[in-house]
C-alpha cells in the first residue's frame, strides 16, 4: 500500500469522459479526447482546512470538505466537458457557475419543497413529528433513488457511471497494496465505502431523525428554511460516518470496531452505488490511473512525487 494513502486517502470524481483525483497537495484530471488521447490537467490545492485549523475539527471539517468538493468538482466537470467535445484549454477554462446555481435551485424544489408540502398536508392527520419526518424522508429518498435510476438509463450517464467505477477500482487496487496496473485494477470492485453517493444517501437518511426535532408547527417556507440551516449539521455527521467507514478499505482486518460499525451503518450507500457505478473498460481504467498519478505528482517544493 502506498504510504500516502495511510494518512491522506485519495478522493475522486467521475467527469465527462474522464476522472478527477485529489491528493493532499494537488488535483489531477485526465480526460479522453475525441482523438483518443489522454488530456491531463494538474493543479496545486490548499484546502480550507489547512488554512484555518478550526475547520479540522470533527463535524466541522465535513462541511468544509463539502464546499470544496462542490466548487472543485463543478469546475472540473465543466472543463472535462469542453475537452471531451474537442475544445482547446483556453475555451475549457471559461466555464461558468450558472449550471450549478440552476441545479441547486432545482434540487431544493424537488428534495425540500415537495416533501415539505406533503408533510404539511399530512400534519392534521398524523400529529407525530417523528412519523411525519419519516414519511417526508422516505419521499425524499424515493425521489433521489428514482432520479438516479432514471438517468442511469441514458447512454451518456452510463459512461459517466463507468468512469465512476474506474475511479473506485483504481483506488481499491491501491488501497489493497497491489501494483497499480490496468489488469490489476480491472479485478477490483467499482464499489467503495468512501463515496459521494453513499454520503448523499446517508445524509438523506440522517435528516429523518434531525428534522423531526423541528416539530409540526411551521409553515412550508419556515420548514424548508430550517432544514437548509440544519443541513451543515447533518452533512457533518454523514461525513464522519463515511470517513470512518472508509478506514475499513485502507486498514482491512486491522480496522477498529467503530470503523466496522460505521461500515454497516453506511451499507445502504454502497447498495445504491450499484446504480451509480459500472465496471469500467480497460481504456477507462487507464484514464483513472493517469489521473491518480497526476494528482500524486503535485507535491510541495522540494518533495518527491508519491508513486502508488
Image (cartoon, rainbow, N blue to C red):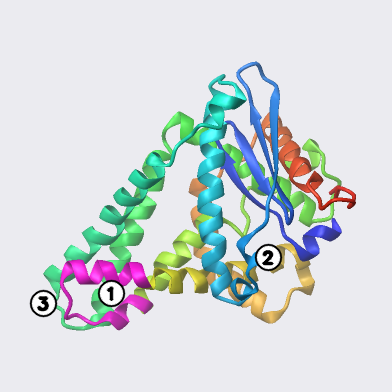
Please tell me in which quadrant of the rendered image residue 87 appears. Answer: top right
Magenta range:
210-229
Q: Is residue 191 left or right of residue 112?
A: right
The residue beneath circle 3 is 125
Task: Name the N-terminal-most of marks 3 and 2.
Answer: 2
Element type where label 2 sits in the image:
helix
Q: Nearer the viewer, mark 2 or mark 1?
A: 2
Q: Is residue 222 magenta?
A: yes
In the rendered view, tell whether residue 280 sits above or below residue 239. above
Q: Residues within 10 Å of mark 1 (few under 14, many from 20)?
A: many
Q: Nearer the viewer, mark 3 or mark 1?
A: 1
Q: Position of residue 108 (x, y in %)?
A: 30, 56
Q: Are marks 3 and 2 in contact (CB under 8 Å)?
A: no
The residue beneath circle 2 is 50
Distance of label 3 from label 1 (alpha carbons)? 13 Å
Question: For the point 23% across and 60% down, which residue is it?
Answer: 113
Q: Position of residue 64 (x, y in %)?
A: 55, 64
* Residue in the foreground of this view, choosing between 26 and 19: 26
The residue beneath circle 1 is 133
Element type where label 3 sits in the image:
loop
Task: Name the N-terminal-most of marks 3 and 1.
Answer: 3
Please tell me in which quadrant of the rendered image residue 291 appears. Answer: top right
Element type where label 1 sits in the image:
helix
Q: Is residue 72 magenta?
A: no
Distance of label 2 from label 1 (alpha carbons)? 37 Å
Q: Position of residue 147 (x, y in %)?
A: 36, 47
Task: Name the N-terminal-most of marks 2 and 1.
Answer: 2
Please identify the quadrant where the N terminus is shown: bottom right
Amino acid at each position: 500500500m502506498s504510504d500516502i494513502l495511510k494518512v491522506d486517502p485519495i478522493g475522486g470524481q467521475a467527469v465527462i469522459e474522464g476522472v478527477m483525483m485529489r491528493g493532499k497537495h494537488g488535483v489531477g484530471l485526465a480526460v479522453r479526447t475525441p482523438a483518443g488521447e489522454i488530456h491531463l490537467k494538474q493543479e496545486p490545492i490548499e484546502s480550507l482546512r489547512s488554512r484555518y485549523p478550526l475547520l479540522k475539527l470533527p463535524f466541522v471539517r465535513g462541511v468544509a470538505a463539502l464546499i470544496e468538493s462542490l466548487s472543485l468538482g463543478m469546475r472540473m466537470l465543466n472543463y472535462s466537458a469542453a475537452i471531451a467535445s474537442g475544445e482547446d484549454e483556453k475555451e475549457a477554462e471559461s466555464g461558468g457557475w450558472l449550471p450549478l446555481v440552476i441545479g441547486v435551485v432545482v434540487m431544493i424544489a424537488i428534495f425540500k419543497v415537495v416533501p415539505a408540502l406533503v408533510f404539511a398536508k399530512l400534519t392534521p392527520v398524523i400529529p407525530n413529528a417523528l412519523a411525519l419526518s419519516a414519511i417526508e424522508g422516505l419521499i425524499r429518498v424515493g425521489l433521489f433513488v428514482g432520479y438516479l435510476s432514471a438517468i442511469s438509463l441514458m447512454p451518456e450517464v452510463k459512461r459517466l457511471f463507468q468512469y465512476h467505477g474506474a475511479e473506485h477500482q483504481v483506488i481499491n487496487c491501491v488501497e489493497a497494496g497491489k501494483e497499480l496496473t490496468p489488469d490489476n485494477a480491472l479485478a477490483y470492485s467499482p464499489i467503495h465505502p468512501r463515496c459521494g453517493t453513499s454520503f448523499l444517501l446517508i445524509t438523506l437518511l440522517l435528516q429523518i431523525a434531525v428534522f423531526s426535532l423541528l416539530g409540526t408547527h411551521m409553515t412550508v417556507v419556515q420548514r424548508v428554511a430550517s432544514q437548509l440551516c440544519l443541513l451543515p449539521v447533518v452533512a457533518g455527521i454523514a461525513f464522519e460516518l463515511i470517513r470512518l467507514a472508509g478506514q475499513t478499505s485502507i486498514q482491512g482486518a486491522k480496522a477498529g470496531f467503530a470503523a466496522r460499525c460505521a461500515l454497516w451503518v453506511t451499507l445502504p450507500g454502497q447498495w445504491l452505488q450499484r446504480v451509480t457505478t459500472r465496471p469500467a473498460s480497460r481504456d477507462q481504467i487507464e484514464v483513472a490511473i493517469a489521473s491518480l498519478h497526476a494528482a500524486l505528482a503535485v507535491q510541495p517544493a522540494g518533495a518527491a512525487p508519491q508513486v502508488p
